[in-house]
């Protein structure tokens, strides 16, 4: 009997890098689909990390869903598609054991900071030498296999004709997995920037041991985008992402001048007249800055989150190239990380002074956080309706 799923990768570091981004939880819900493998980790229904191993990460990807021979022929195409989606195998596996298995096989974790910060947040741009573990594993192949429903998840590493196999016990989900709801049609904030900027900001705020992260964003006035750490034993600290004053000075105009510039247009009779147009102001470090709060919020978005939960995404911040920070009307915060994997470095970034574009596949890791309804509830369990 052929296995339900078999995937072969010639670069297990890619798998480890993505899965370690959601390694804050001990278990993960796995769903195998024709397009890839979806790993979901959550904690207390207030934080969720989603990593998708796209089929492009595998040199060979074979998925044969369970047979549907008893399906009624008169079913409509829409119902058939819904039934097929429901039949995609789904199970729970120990995420910590899976990561540890990859490490036992030699996919060692990247260099961690040497006590430079109390936060112990992963560093960005870790160096890798020609004799490090990842560099010596370029010729290994990793095979993931799931034979049938209820079977263990098999992981096999092949090197120079020697095959090592590890089988992880799988568990059936007690209830249908429900993601933390994010209203994609109700997004009120979208900010795209380099992930390193966010990582550095969180690491800096972490030095004061805060319990709450306050987020503030406004499209009309300063501070445009600010992150504050509060609730800790020390005073509140704030990091503001502002416009570059040097860039403004070099342009020969003030911020107000840039916000309202005169442009000349030609009328029907050939004469010129001017009109004032308001330029869209945005922090210098952002590539996209869209803030449109509902009228009930005024002109500024203000939300609070548990700092400890935000810090769990530090690994993803460290390895990602860019991050899309989004918020919806419910206050749910989404960090969507873009990870460009490279064959030369475990994090998709170049080592050394030269800057190179990543040549490997591009993947995404998504985090979702439930807001604090009251700062006094920072140490309690806060959840929103997921029905």
Image (cartoon, grey):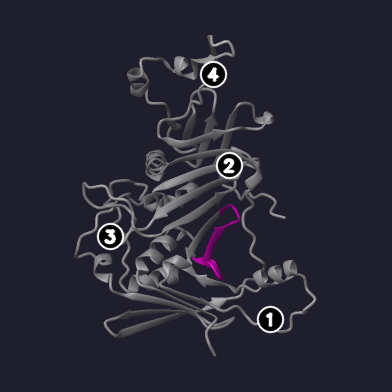
**Residue of label 4:** 277
Was residue 298 drawn as part of the magenta stretch in this picture? no
Is label 4 in contact with label 2 (beta carbons under 8 Å)? Answer: no
Q: Position of residue 206 (x, y in %)?
A: 40, 42
Q: CA distance from mark 2 to mark 3?
A: 34 Å
Between tags 2 and 3, which lies in front? 3
Could you tell me which residue is drawn at 54 percent across and 28 percent down?
218
Was residue 46 drawn as part of the magenta stretch in this picture? yes
Residue 25 vertical position relative to residue 215 in the rendered view, above or below: below
Between tags 1 and 4, which lies in front? 4
374 relative to 157 in the view: left or right:
right
Q: CA distance from mark 3 to mark 4?
A: 47 Å
Is label 1 in contact with label 4 (beta carbons under 8 Å)? Answer: no
Residues rendered magenta in the picture: 26-47
Quarter holding residue 165 = bottom left
Q: Position of residue 154 (x, y in %)?
A: 46, 80
Name the quadrant of the C terminus.
bottom right
Between tags 4 and 2, which lies in front? 4
Is label 2 in contact with label 3 (beta carbons under 8 Å)? Answer: no
Q: CA distance from mark 4 to mark 2?
A: 28 Å
**Residue of label 1:** 68
Could you tell me which residue is drawn at 51 percent across and 26 percent down?
280
Between tags 2 and 1, which lies in front? 1
**Residue of label 3:** 344
**How crowded is the residue under tag 2: few (<14 C-alpha within 10 Å), some, or many (20+)?**
many
Q: Pick whichever of labels 1 and 4 is earlier in the sequence.
A: 1
Quarter holding residue 376 = top right
Q: Pick whichever of labels 2 and 3 is earlier in the sequence.
A: 2
């Amino acid at each position: 009997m052929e296995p339900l799923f078999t995937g072969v990768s010639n670069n297990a570091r890619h798998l480890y890098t993505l899965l370690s981004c959601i390694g804050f939880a001990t278990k993960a819900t796995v769903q195998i689909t024709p397009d890839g493998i979806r790993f979901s980790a959550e904690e207390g229904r207030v934080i969720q990390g989603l990593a998708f191993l796209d089929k492009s990460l595998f040199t060979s990807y074979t998925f044969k869903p369970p047979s549907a021979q008893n399906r009624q022929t008169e079913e409509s195409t829409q119902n058939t598609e819904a039934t097929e989606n429901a039949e995609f195998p789904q199970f729970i596996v120990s995420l910590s054991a899976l990561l540890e298995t990859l490490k036992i096989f030699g996919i060692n974790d990247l260099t961690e900071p040497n006590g430079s910060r109390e936060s112990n947040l992963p560093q960005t741009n870790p160096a890798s030498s020609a004799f490090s573990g990842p560099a010596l594993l370029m010729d290994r192949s990793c095979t993931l296999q799931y034979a049938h429903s209820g079977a263990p998840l098999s992981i096999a590493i092949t090197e120079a004709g020697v095959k090592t196999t590890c089988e992880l016990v799988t568990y059936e989900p007690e209830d249908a997995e429900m993601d933390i709801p994010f209203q994609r049609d109700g997004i009120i904030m979208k900010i795209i920037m380099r992930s390193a900027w966010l990582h550095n900001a969180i690491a800096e705020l972490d030095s004061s041991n805060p319990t709450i992260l306050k987020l503030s964003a406004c499209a009309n006035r300063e501070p445009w985008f600010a992150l504050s750490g509060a609730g800790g034993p020390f005073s509140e600290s704030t990091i503001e992402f502002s416009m570059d004053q040097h860039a403004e000075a070099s342009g020969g105009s003030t911020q107000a001048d840039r916000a309202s510039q005169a442009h000349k247009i030609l009328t029907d009779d050939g004469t010129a007249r001017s009109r004032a147009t308001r330029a869209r102001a945005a922090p210098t470090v952002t590539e996209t800055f869209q803030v449109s709060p509902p009228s009930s919020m005024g002109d500024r978005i203000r939300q609070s989150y548990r700092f400890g939960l935000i810090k769990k995404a530090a690994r993803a911040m460290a390895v990602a190239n860019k991050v899309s920070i989004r918020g919806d009307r419910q206050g749910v915060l989404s960090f969507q990380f873009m990870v460009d994997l490279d064959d030369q470095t475990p994090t998709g970034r170049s080592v050394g002074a030269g800057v190179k574009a990543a040549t490997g596949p591009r993947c995404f890791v998504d985090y979702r956080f439930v807001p604090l309804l009251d700062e006094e509830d920072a140490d309690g369990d806060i959840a929103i309706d997921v029905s």
